[in-house]
Image (cartoon, rainbow, N blue to C red):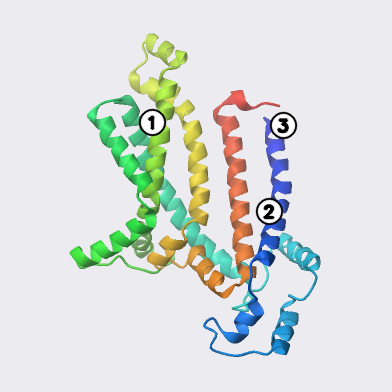
Amino acid sequence: MRAYAAKRVLLFFPTMILTTVIVFGLFWVVPGDVAMLILVGAEGEDTASLDDVAELRHELGLDRPIHVQYSSWLWDVLRGDLGTSLWYRAPVTAELRDRFMVTVELSVLAILMAFAVGVPLGIISAVKQDTRTDYASRVFALMGVALPNFWLGVLIVSGLAAFAGWLPPLGYAALWEDPLLNLQQLMFPALVLSFSNLGLTARITRSSMLEVLREDYVRTARAKGLSEFVVLVRHTLKNALLPVVTITGYQFAGLLGGVIIIESIFVVPGVGSWTIQSIQHRDFVVLQGVIVLGAAVILTLNLIIDLLYGVLDPRIRYQ
């Protein structure tokens, strides 16, 4: 197990370095000049001379060779400094930390809702295979996979306003300041985000359960006279959870990077809404910080999933 874990940990660092190279290089391929955008405004309402643009580029350090900029940026990142926003002129690390915690809270709530509903739904569907319960569960899961979450979010907000005359409380209140209001504000966006995830979780759980239920050791457990509950929980569910753990980890990583539209619909001040503003202003320092943080989270989650594989199934602890 130690050798298996060490190999997974050692793969983390070169992958992360390669990610920083790609992230930094891509923003030099995208057309546009942030110095020009700052001087003329987002709508182009002002004018600027070439000398003014050159002076601002020098002030922002954009006229240095790209390898010098990358080396300086990477050294700052390794020290926990993601730079200063080119548009807001504020430290990226402090702002990103606060907004990232909001997005993490929303994503954790969504993934817990998806797991709490999707796994039991998949188990029931597998145990009741080819019955009305199974068909109803599969239709519900397909709806979750098929419906776009941004459409569902707009439908919930407009439907509540039109038919109930009520809007969910928009914005964000800190959990430690007002837990009840915080839950009310995040409940609906988390529900929207979890709907598509629980559909996929239910389908994966059902398929995995059906495969494990046909294994010889399950039949042996039943032949020993064990109750159906013990067979399902102790002998079937543990092995069936391997692909579910994998997909849940990827779903959580996807939520962290894919809540942009939902945060905008429900006015949640997370990383997603800040990313939209940074794209509009071409503030690539902020975008680099967001993407690097997202990549680090995804790689860390992949590492945790690999280690959980070794815990759940000793057979894959290969050397």
In this picture, is 245 found above or below 84? above
In this picture, is 257 found above or below 199? below
| Image coords of residue 268 (percent x, y) | 43, 66
Dot placed on the residue nearer the N-terminal end, 3 or 1: 3
According to the image, label 1 marks what residue?
206
Q: Is residue 199 left or right of residue 72?
A: left
Q: Which quarter of the figure is the N terminus placed in?
A: top right
Amino acid bearing label 1: Arg
Q: CA distance from mark 2 to mark 1?
A: 35 Å
Q: Residue at x 41, y 40 (%)?
A: 200
Judge the density around disc 3: few (<14), some (14-19), many (≥20) Cα neighbours within 10 Å: few
Marks 2/1 in contact by CB < 8 Å: the verdict is no
Q: Is residue 249 left or right of residue 175?
A: right
Residue 190 visible in this rendered orientation of the protein: no
Q: CA distance from mark 2 to mark 3?
A: 25 Å
According to the image, label 3 marks what residue?
3
Residue 142's quadrant in the figure? Answer: top left
In this picture, is 133 found above or below 50? above
- Where disc 2 sits, the SS reads helix
Residue 155 visible in this rendered orientation of the protein: yes
According to the image, label 2 marks what residue?
19
Instruction: Find residue 301 and name its label.
Output: none
Q: CA distance from mark 3 to mark 1?
A: 33 Å
Q: Residue at x 24, y 63 (%)?
A: 160
The mark lying in front, picked from 2 and 3, is 2
- Where disc 1 sits, the SS reads helix
Q: Is residue 49 left or right of residue 192?
A: right
- Where disc 3 sits, the SS reads helix
Judge the density around disc 1: few (<14), some (14-19), many (≥20) Cα neighbours within 10 Å: many
Q: Residue at x 39, y 49 (%)?
A: 194
| Image coords of residue 224 (percent x, y) | 40, 9
